[in-house]
Amino acid sequence: MKRNWLIILTSICILLAVAAGCIEGSFTKTETALVKLDQQENIQWISVIENPDYATAMALARPQFCQFIQTSDNGFFVAGYYSNRSGYTTLRVFRTDSNGTPIWDEKLAGVESMGGPMISPIQWEDGGYSVILSGGRVNNFDAAGRSLGAANIQDPICRTNGTVCYDLTPVSLTQNPDGSLTWILTNGNFSTSETSLISAMLTRNGTLLTKEILPLKISTGVTDFIRTNDKGWLSGKGYRDDASGGGNEILIEKTNASSDVSWDTVLGACNKTAFCNNDLIGMHESGDGYDIIYQSYPQQSNESVPADTISVRLDSQGHIVRQDKISDLSGRHVWIFANGGSRADFSEQSQKIPQKVLDSAANANGTNNPIFDLRSFIRTADGGYALLGTRYYWK
């Protein structure tokens, strides 16, 4: 499913890139806006950052193409694809302090959007940063924003133990306490319809430390996959229920260290008068149980129905302890960016942000009524939130 998603996304990006050229002439400039909210969703500050020579700030961007994290000193690190006035697209990274004031701002020549969507930026213990693209490219920076070069962490995986890489697709990426990365990928062979799963541990510079080819039976159809503390696995995949009131539900499956299935649980929530889609957003192990985020919406409807975001808590045996529909910003859990296997984009995520916040972000320190386009938002260490978006000034 993720393989198809990547193909579709690439096609959309190409189409939108063409469209961006037409859009570019319709506004005069753009700015990047950072907004900090407290736990009650009140604005603490708004920082407006210039986009010098960036005409579109990636008008075609989805949240996968512009992401940010909170740093260890409560500042922010932002990475995004930006297009200049000549139409050239590059990777831009910048760092702010805890009040949103820029500290440094760099761009990488030659790093274009063909690198694919981003997996969450990472800060390391030494103060450096990495931006990891879905195609396996890792761009490394020191604490001052100077480039330390790039590596492709998928290349060494294909060069060892006789692995033949037909179509590597990342499923999850985890930052380990020792400074390494654990990269989980599917390796699919379209000609035989076979898929295997690879777990590899690498340094940020692309040195392969360990590699394990996992049993086929636990990878078939999986879209999300995380390793659990008991050396087993938690996986999520689509589950089709054709019964009346059914739909495309989600099967959560837990395996032990021997890859034997311990339990499975089906998740899905929707108006049962319609056939429903349920899309898994992310999974996380915390304490003696697991947290799941997914979205649910009718497949067919005569009117536009926004997706419901659902937060689920499972105990260690897969029983549903709690399942709540999220109506505010709390839907963005801290672990969504802490675990690379979680997707960065919630459908209709802006609907969970108070309109007064969006209006303030659009109008702060600006003239000529710019439009604020939300890119993404995160939970912050103080229990509050931060928003990242682009402001467009139209002609």
Image (spheres, grey):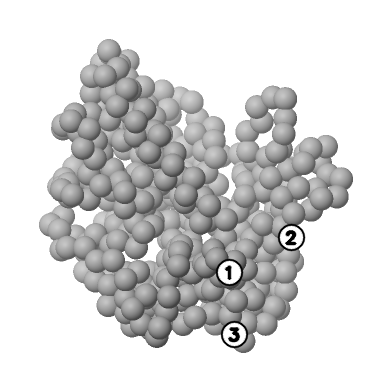
Tell me where residue 274 sits by quadrant.
Answer: top right
Q: Residue at x 42, y 71 (%)?
A: 165
Kind of residue at disc 1? Thr
- Nearer the N terminus, badge 3 or badge 2? 3
The local secondary structure at tag 3 comes to loop
| Contact check, label 3 and label 2, Cβ < 8 Å | no
Which residue lies under the disc numbered 1?
192
Kind of residue at disc 2? Val
Tell me where residue 36 sits by quadrant.
Answer: top left
The answer to whether residue 342 is seen in the rendering is yes
Q: Position of residue 233 (x, y in %)?
A: 58, 75
- 269 displayed left or right of 79: right
326 is higher (above) or lower (below) than 167: above
* Residue 104: numbered disc: none
Q: Residue at x 12, y 57 (%)?
A: 146
- Residue at the far right in the pictured view: 244
* Depth order, front residue of 332/385: 332
| Contact check, label 3 and label 1, Cβ < 8 Å | no
The local secondary structure at tag 2 comes to strand
Which residue lies under the disc numbered 3?
257
* Depth order, front residue of 14/376: 14
129 is higher (above) or lower (below) than 87: below
Q: Residue at x 60, y 76 (%)?
A: 216
- Nearer the N terminus, badge 2 or badge 1? 1
Q: Disc 2 vs disc 1: which is toward the camera?
A: 1
* Depth order, front residue of 368/17: 17
Q: What is the distance, in whole Å, between disc 2 and disc 1 at their CAs?
A: 29 Å
101 is higher (above) or lower (below) than 134: above
Q: Position of residue 360 (x, y in %)?
A: 38, 25
Q: Within 10 Å of the Cα at label 3, are there few (<14), some (14-19), or many (20+) other Cα atoms?
A: few
Kind of residue at disc 3? Ala
Q: Within 10 Å of the Cα at label 2, are there few (<14), some (14-19), or many (20+) other Cα atoms?
A: some
